[in-house]
Amino acid sequence: MKGKFTIVMIVGIMMSLMFLGWTDSAQAASKKYKLRFTAGYSPTAVDMMAIGKILKEITERSGGAVTFETFWGGALGKVLEHLDLVGKRTADIGEAPLGAWPAKVPFFGFEYAFPFGPSDPEIVTKCMYTMFSEFPEFDKQLKDNNLFLIATLPWDTYMGSSREQIKSLKDLKGKKIGLWGIYFPKWVEAVGGIGVPRPMVEGYMMLKTGVLDISLEPVDVTLTHKHYEVAKHFFFLNSGAFTPKYVIMNLDAWKELTPELQKLFLEVGRKISLEFAAELRENRAKIIDQLLKEKKILTTYALTAAENTSWAAAMPDLPAEWAKRMEEKGLPGWKALDRWMELTTGMGHKWPRAWGKR
């Protein structure tokens, strides 16, 4: 009798434990996450639309376990506040141009220091993901700011929206050229241009009022911001594509996700960023043809290979300067420089000069 009672007790305890386990699993499976998303730009901007697709697909594929409360157009703060907005968890997830914070995340935005790189955004995006996987410094710098990287989104190769017709590289001399970042000023100074810092949202009025003669940007950005209304001439410098936009998540919020959801976030982020890169490449010619057909632009000029080579030769060795600064910070600048050149060359790109001379 005592033995039967013991067996009954053991079975009861086991069933109770199993029930508790099932309850915990069910609760974990049914847990809902409502995350606050922030961006400094309008949801109708081309790259923000791609981010919108990321959020939508995560919600759909999670079966509604993850939803997003979105704050577009700087509703929570200005563009340059977004790293802290996410790091301090004013928002759980957001978009930020990480190259804008060289003091906090100095490894990001390095591709802008490599003039005339691959013009295919898909190639640049694939190479960038390889760099992220091979250099833990990227991840560490984000974690130091309580952040985690979900995805990077590219911008297409740059062109210039110009108030006057450009017929050769020499026509850039003396022009006030709107640009972004710490490297483009050195690009334009090498050919006698005058670099003028330009927030993209202010480019239209700066062109219209003559503060700028030219604005450097991808053609889809020109279309979004309607720069063709005040700058009727294009020239193509084949600058190379870049990855200035990042989807970042608060590290504490990231850790609260289940491993399955973490995998989903990364999978969707990478998939859509590469799809977006391919779309940028395919849509480039379509946009230009459309603007020409509708007479929204009057002339175009593509710098010749010789002009690009001449321009590159006139510049300081910006990649070497970047590598030296990184080494001074205790970061593997030379190793990263060599790997970037190796990756892009391996994808078929021919650089106009050998950057990174020791």
Image (cartoon, rainbow, N blue to C red):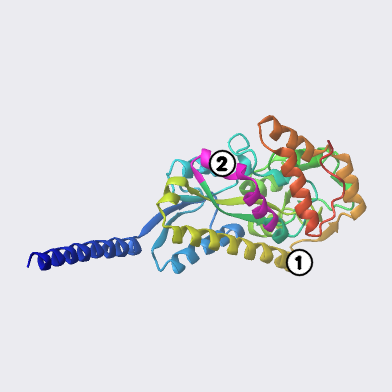
Q: Secondary structure at mark 2?
A: helix
Q: Which residue is mark 2?
A: 140
Is residue 148 among what the camera can see?
A: yes
- For residue 326: magenta? no
Amino acid found under the numbered disc labelled 1: Ala
Can you name the residue that lies furthest to the right here? Answer: 306
- For residue 140: magenta? yes
Left-right relation of 329 to 194: left
Report the disc number at residue 285.
1
Is residue 162 among what the camera can see?
A: no
State the image coordinates of residue 92 (x, y, percent, origin top left). 44, 49
Q: Residue at x 72, y 59 (%)?
A: 123
Q: Compare marks 1 and 2 and give the one earlier in the sequence.
A: 2
Quadrant of the drawing holding the N terminus: bottom left
Q: Residue at x 78, y 51 (%)?
A: 342
Q: CA distance from mark 1 to mark 2?
A: 39 Å
- 45 up-or-down from 64: above or below: above
Q: Nearer the viewer, residue 249 or 20?
A: 20
Amino acid found under the numbered disc labelled 2: Lys
State the image coordinates of residue 277 (x, y, percent, origin top left). 67, 62
State the image coordinates of residue 49 (x, y, percent, origin top left). 56, 61
Q: Residue at x 82, y 51 (%)?
A: 164
Left-right relation of 122 to 234: left
State the image coordinates of residue 298 (x, y, percent, origin top left). 80, 61
Give the magenta part as a residue range.
126-147
Within 10 Å of the Cα at label 2, are there few (<14), some (14-19), or many (20+) other Cα atoms?
A: some
Quadrant of the drawing holding the C terminus: top right
Within 10 Å of the Cα at label 1, are there few (<14), some (14-19), or many (20+) other Cα atoms?
A: few
* Residues at marks 1 and 2 touching, judged by CB atoms closer than 8 Å: no
Q: Nearer the viewer, residue 155 or 21?
A: 21
Which of discs 1 and 2 lies nearer the camera? The answer is: 2
User: Can you tell which quarter of the image residue 228 is in?
Assistant: bottom right
